[in-house]
Image (cartoon, rainbow, N blue to C red):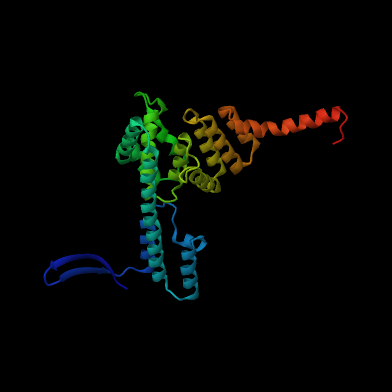
Amino acid sequence: MGIVSDWVIEDFFNGTLEIEFQCPDIDTLESNIEDTVRKYDPGFKLDGIFSSDNEYYKVICEKLTRGSIDKAQFIFLVLLLWSYDHFVYNRRQSQKNVYDECVEVAGKDASAEAAFKAKLEGYFRHDKSSQRLLHLAENSTDTGLWLSVFHKDVDEEGSKELISETELNTLSAQISRFLESYKDNQCLDYLSGVVRLAADQFDDTDGEVRMSSSLDKVMSASRESALTLIRETLSLKKFFSEEARGRLARLVHEKFGDQQVLEEINQEFEDPYSYHTLLSPLAARLQRLTSSYKGVDW
């Protein structure tokens, strides 16, 4: 089997081309596809295709198992399916970002137009923040670095503080841009959830859905890392409204199901959800005791 590795037009009018071929073995093909996909999905492994829920992957896995296709054909089919899934997703996400911004500014005053202009500028801006996002996207396993994008240096001694509201809006636009290129990236998904939470847009498909998916992945690898990530997120509380704090508390409680974790959130957030969830059993118990004292048979 030969693969075109390079080509040069020797004579355009007569259609003469010089073509270089390579004849890689199966191990090289497998290594090459993994190297290519990992630029966008750091955790990708070809063997992981066999446990995928993707219906098309299931079909080609079944064909390989039956012997209808060989391993080389299987590898190229995986590449074709992944390319379609990734790059079509890229176009859809790009259209969604433009649509969201247009809806946001439609029918509003001049201040909204100024904010729209600022978001567009932030979307295309390349600075330290976007460079850091690129590094995190390509090295998404270190959860300890994820929330560093919400902090900035304030002096030469390394002291840090939270970024401003304007910087947060720019960061949000940059994350939207990166989401177009990185599908199902656990770091970007979590960061997208945080900025959507801060904007009270957690119901958006780039909000709770992405954060929930990211937490599932982190927890499957290390529950302690997920818990540390949540604790670090609590330090961003100045960005969150009371409702947003309650939304995050509810999501975390659903994932961990641990009252101690919820108590930690309540201590930091003082949000209505954690108060209600923690106090409801006590209120019910108090009601039972009061009723019993009054002679009511429970």
Quarter of the rendering containing residue 288:
top right
Q: Position of residue 226 (x, y in %)?
A: 53, 41
Quarter of the rendering containing residue 81:
bottom left
State the residue in front, 257 or 121. 121
In the image, farthest residue toward the front: 107
State the residue in front, 22 or 208. 208
Report whether 25 appears left or right of 295: left
State the residue in front, 175 or 297. 297
Report whether 144 appears left or right of 7: right
For the N terminus, the quadrant is: bottom left
Up-down: is 92 above or below 155?
below
Q: Residue at horizontal 35%, vertical 45%?
A: 98
Q: Residue at horizontal 57%, vertical 34%?
A: 246
Task: Answer whether residue 170 is visible to the viewer in this image.
Answer: yes
For the C terminus, the quadrant is: top right
Report whether 100 appears left or right of 241: left
**Number of numbered discs overlaid on the protein picture:** 0
Q: Where is residue 258 in the image (x, y as percent from the top left)?
A: 64, 39
Q: Position of residue 247 (x, y in %)?
A: 55, 37
Q: Position of residue 252 (x, y in %)?
A: 57, 39
State the residue in front, 178 or 67. 178
Task: Answer whether residue 39 is visible to the viewer in this image.
Answer: no
Q: Residue at horizontal 65%, vertical 36%?
A: 259
